[in-house]
Image (tube, grey):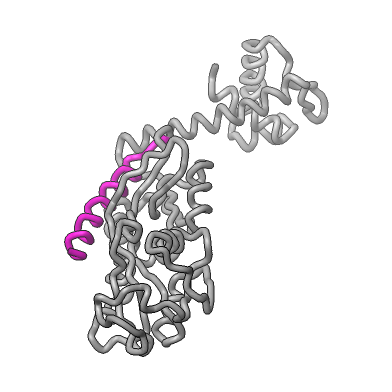
Amino acid sequence: MNFLNLQYFLKAAEERNITRAARKLYISQQSLSGHIAKLEEELGVPLFERGTELKLTYAGERVELLARKICSLEQEILQETDEIRDRRRGRLRLGISYTCGRAILPAVLPEFHRNHPLVEFSLVEGNHLQLNNRLRNGEIDVLIGYMPIDVLGAEVEPLLRERLFLVCPKAMLRQAPGESGEQLDMAALQGRPFILLKEGNRIRAMLDAYLAKLDLTPPPLLLETENIETAFSLAEQGMGITVYPELFLTALHPDALLENAPVALLPLPGEETLGCLAIAFLESSYRSPAVLDFIALCRRKAAQWERISR
């Protein structure tokens, strides 16, 4: 089947007028009528009821619907072969959480853009559940987030493992009974107010699993929030204790590592508080050279981050 015949048929179906359609296609009316006649002959059915205004037959309506799908697939074929040929053009749709994006993208995107200046990049931000759903539905090409990434048919590649830290106002630390300093146990902070992410967030789930293993009751909540940066800022102001990933600390809050910082950073021991940052994509989806280069760049950067954290 001739793609050009289909494209000319679609323009005639859109305009409902041979003269207007031919003018927009920059061809003669006779040439356009010839292309449509060849398509009708090939299919063995009339596609239009001729008159002052063209009207699609029932067969024409069905062919129009399917022809649009075929022409869309043609464009996809042309795009993919163009990318394979010169590795320049393409599209990358990345799903990532807001804070994870703040920590990671400044180290990744400038280099990626220098190497692929013509690649169309779009960023989709959301929480763990939202991003998993977007990957499952094919709305994003790549997802960067914390495991587990529960998407059927997704290839999940770990990037780096990092520990959760307790972010505790130093004033509360001095008031806590028992041990002090970096060896402070969670039990010593029972009764102190916590500012945590809402249930359903991966970091919150990790803390809940850690407390359950220690057989500790959940801490009293001063506030629950969807924004981990809000929790960190309030902890810095002395309002309560929160938890924060190691990568975010080193990338976004290096001042918190200084001796005169208003908060103490206490690593939470145990497998439950080790998070794994991963990159994921659907195994069945086409991955353009640009997408493959982005994945490779994230691998290299993750190896650098892991060396720094050690």
Give yes or no for residue 55 being in the magenta stretch: no
Which secondary structure type mostly characterizes the magenta part of the structure?
Answer: helix
Examine the image and state in which quarter residue 1 appears.
Answer: top right
Q: Residue at x 46, y 80 (%)?
A: 191
- In the foreground, 49 or 272: 272
Q: Residue at x 29, y 86 (%)?
A: 261
Q: Is residue 159 visible?
A: yes
The number of numbered discs placed on residues in the rendered structure image is 0
Q: Is residue 106 visible?
A: no
Q: Position of residue 289 (x, y in %)?
A: 32, 40
Q: Residue at x 28, y 70 (%)?
A: 267
Q: Position of residue 259 (x, y in %)?
A: 23, 86
- Magenta region, residue range: 285-310
Q: Position of residue 290 (x, y in %)?
A: 33, 45
Q: Position of residue 271 (x, y in %)?
A: 31, 56
Q: Is residue 101 above or below residue 51?
A: below
- In the foreground, 14 or 249: 249
